[in-house]
Amino acid sequence: MSWVIEGETGAWELVCGLEIHAQVISKAKLFSGASTEFGAEPNTRVSPVDAGMPGMLPVLNMFCVEQAVRTGLGLRARINLFSVFERKNYFYPDLPNGYQISQYAHPIVGRGSVTIELSDGTTKEIGITRLHLEMDAGKSIHDRLPDATLIDLNRSGVALMEIVTEPDIRAPEEAVAFMRKLRAILRYLGTCDGNMEEGSLRCDANVSVRRVGSAELGTRTEIKNVNSMRFIARAIEYEARRQVEILESGGVVEQETRLFDDRRGVTRSMRTKEEAHDYRYFPDPDLLPLELDPAFVERIRASLPELPDEKKARFVREYGLSAYDAGVLVAEREVADWFEAAARGRDAKKVANWIITELFGALNRAGLDIGRCPIRPQQLGRLLDLVEEGKLSGRLAKDVFAVMFETGRDPDAIVEERGLVQVTDAAALEPIVERVVAENPRQVETYRKNPKVIGWFVGQVMKATRGKANPQLVQELLRKHLERA
Ligand code: ADP
Ligand code: MG
């Protein structure tokens, strides 16, 4: 995918790497037994460990470790059997310990990769540099009281996975495709719910630019907390263009942390970039290095679900779907399951088509996701059977579908009740065909010169039967009557 910024002095290329914080799905926090429930009363899900009380000792939650390993395997990454928790020291009111427990020199997961799919039909590998476990901080609330900041420690100590990518991203679209794919993988694995609005998936984008053809990396800025899929592309593109303008006018890009203002669509400076040594990382003396048994990792590997890429390949192979359709269907596990339930024993391509066009369209308009879809997979399957059996025309099937979506009822019941069964009986259609031909002598003349006009006649008969006639049969009958007319 080639995406360049045409400047005054030539073309520029984007270089971007992402740092993602994904909240681990776990009932308890990373180093305490306190609950991770979202939206609870402030400061009611806090153990003395999470509050940084002196003398309290962190105890590692092995379920969170399992989740990190599971995620690492899903990212086709190296699992490090030896990793170390370190203290990252900084002061902030919502960080009661004065340090965050994180991993630095020895993360639990090393290099991996994610395949992304782009709008031009190509795929690309984005390298994963590492994944490490760390605890979240509390939350500062600035907008409740006019002249005070409140602290909620419910989030303090919740397990996060920080996932860092290589600077492999070359277009804003690639960053979005990566985030979508990563979110799909995390959801399939059940290790993060991927909810960006609630902040359980957060993304910082590192952006630099360089002249097309240059192999060196430019100075980067880090855009913090770009918190919706919609804004990722906008923030990166804005920032890249800003840097090009600076460089072309002879300036230098400051290495700094910037914030994306989603209302104005711009990034603005927040602080100069901190360096690792500012944090004075050192191994946490309260925690032993984490050593994993290879059997522990293998057990997790054996329990992995089928992931989006594998599922997509299987849908292409088993059901003969196009790569595009398969990609759309596997983006969410629930959709993929729904498709398979409807497709069993049927023409899977047709089922896929109906889901992608009709069902997604209806869900979209109703603002529903597949989990709250009023139609069951078997019911859609049955509707397609009725078409296959010649009982419903394609047009009628769409009408029946609309009623099914509204009422959740079975297609057979709707067809019966509304008398929608397709008329395939020549004796019933003959008089209508005859009448349409008799009433339109001018069109019959035109038909003699141009046989394509038969389409117009078919349309008239369909109208007269309110779409219930079998179009093939109508065509046959018309031909007979038009020849005679
Ligand atoms: P830090 O620890 O200071 O945040 P890292 O070197 O770990 O820095 O890199 C963090 C992220 O920045 C990674 O995603 C990496 O791919 C990306 N990155 C590094 N250098 C550049 C660059 N010159 N341009 C764009 N992204 C970069
Ligand atoms: Mg960083």
Image: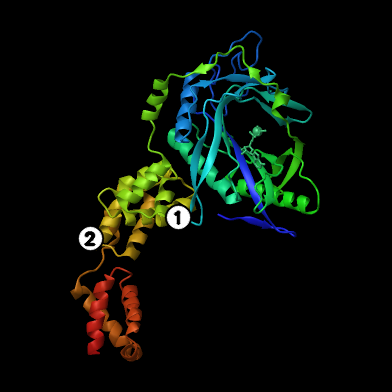
Residue extending farthest top: 55
> For the point 57% across and 51% down, which residue is it?
173
Q: Position of residue 111 (x, y in %)?
A: 52, 33
Q: Is residue 266 visible?
A: yes
Q: Is residue 262 visible?
A: no
**Of residues 357 and 162, the one drawn nearer to the viewer in this rendering:** 162
Tell me the amino acid under the disc marked 1.
Answer: Gly
Q: Position of residue 103 (x, y in %)?
A: 59, 24
Query: Mark 2 and mark 1: span between their CA atoms?
Result: 25 Å
**Of residues 319 and 265, the one drawn nearer to the viewer in this rendering:** 319
Scheme of image coloration:
rainbow
- Taking the image as shown, residue 220 lies to the left or right of residue 200, namely right
> For the point 23% across and 79% down, which residue is it?
477
- Quarter of the image for residue 431 reads bottom left
> In what quadrant of the picture does the C terminus appear?
bottom left
Q: Which residue is mark 2?
A: 389
Q: Which residue is mark 1?
A: 361
Q: SS at mark 2?
A: loop
**Of residues 23 and 482, the one drawn nearer to the viewer in this rendering:** 23
> In what quadrant of the picture does the N terminus appear?
bottom right
Q: Position of residue 314 (x, y in %)?
A: 34, 46
Mark 1: C-beta under 8 Å from nearest atom of ligand 1:
no
